[in-house]
Amino acid sequence: MLLAMTPVRIRVTPLAAYLLALAVYSCFMCISTLKEHQRRHYEAMTANNAGTDEEQRPRIHRRTRSLDPPKFITVDDFYSWLSSPETECRKLVRFGGTYCRKTVDYDKNVCLDPDVALKPRNCTVYSFGIGHDTSFDDMSNYFGCDVFMFDPTINKSDVNSQLLEKQKFFHIGISAKNYVDIENTEWDVIPYLSRKNLWPGIMQIAIEVHTMAIMDLPPENVMDELQRYARILLLLRKEGFLRVSYRANYVEETLYKVPGENRSIPTCSEVLYIRRGPRLINI
């Protein structure tokens, strides 16, 4: 079947031409404004040399030279200690993150203070345990870092990243078991890295700290386990790493029910350490 095509004439009035030009101009202005906002945000993140000497001078809190853990009397004492910063970060930013369970998850804090900041095109990120969320890895890559991702629980074809060609993925982990790569095994990895002296060159460590093992222990053994955790974390202080931020993860299955009380304590948390203190040898 053939269809006869009737010519259609379009008449553009001066008013229509003006409105069209205004719409195009507004569109370009929106795009320009967005790009300018992104540029300013990026420059603010990478302005490692900005500020006065007073602003750049890091503040280190007291007791950071002690390698002996406090004597915890209650469970709250341990988590109060873990959540207390040992130094501060004036340019603390979040890399990555996905909205999950009515909150943002899978993100990591990164400090961009001049003395510890990542330097674009001259930084390396090792990411252990990526699962199906690469938002942190992608942002690290976008920032200008070489990204190495490790996870034995997924294959490279399962990695959902638009930047995979610029990243390196390895189907291995750093746990002694292959069913998971790092969950709850940081307590073995930290002492191992210390024994092998593998900390040089590392400026920041973002860890999801897992202490939910106390949920399965008899009450009389809980404090001993928390003291053990503290001794391991103090190995980081020995290498000059100081705790700068803490955020509890309120996941139902990891909440510790305080015996005899109608309340719970989160046993998992995101903790950031930065290398700012002197290396200590008297441990």
Image (cartoon, grey):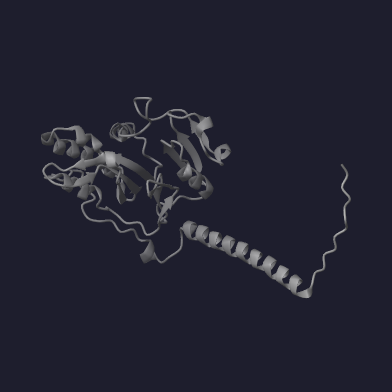
Question: Residue placed at 47% from the left, 36% from the top?
Answer: 149
Number of marks: 0
Residue 171 visible in the shown view: yes
In the rendered image, residue 260, in percent from the top left (x then y), is placed at 11, 43
Image quadrant holding the N terminus, namely top right
Q: Foreground: 244 or 177?
A: 177
Q: Classify residue 21 as left or right of residue 164.
A: right
Q: Quadrant of the C terminus?
A: top left
Q: Nearer the viewer, residue 170 or 281?
A: 170
Q: Position of residue 233 (x, y in %)?
A: 26, 41
Quadrant in the rendering for residue 67? top left
Residue 90: image quadrant is bottom left
Residue 18 drawn above or below residue 174: below
User: Residue placed farthest to the bottom in the image?
Assistant: 14
Q: Nearer the viewer, residue 136 or 241?
A: 136
Q: Position of residue 159 (x, y in %)?
A: 51, 35
**Whether residue 121 is situated above or below residue 113 in the rendered picture:** above
Above or below 173: residue 252: below
As drawn, which residue projects farthest toward the top? 177
Residue 155 percent location from the top left of the image = 49, 29
Q: Is residue 186 left or right of residue 76?
A: right
Residue 282 in view (yes/no): no
Q: Residue at x 20, y 50 (%)?
A: 80
Residue for point 88% across, 58% down? 7
Q: Is residue 71 left or right of residue 103?
A: left
Give the residue displayed 73% in from the left and 73% down from the top: 18
Name the foreground residue: 16 vs 48. 16
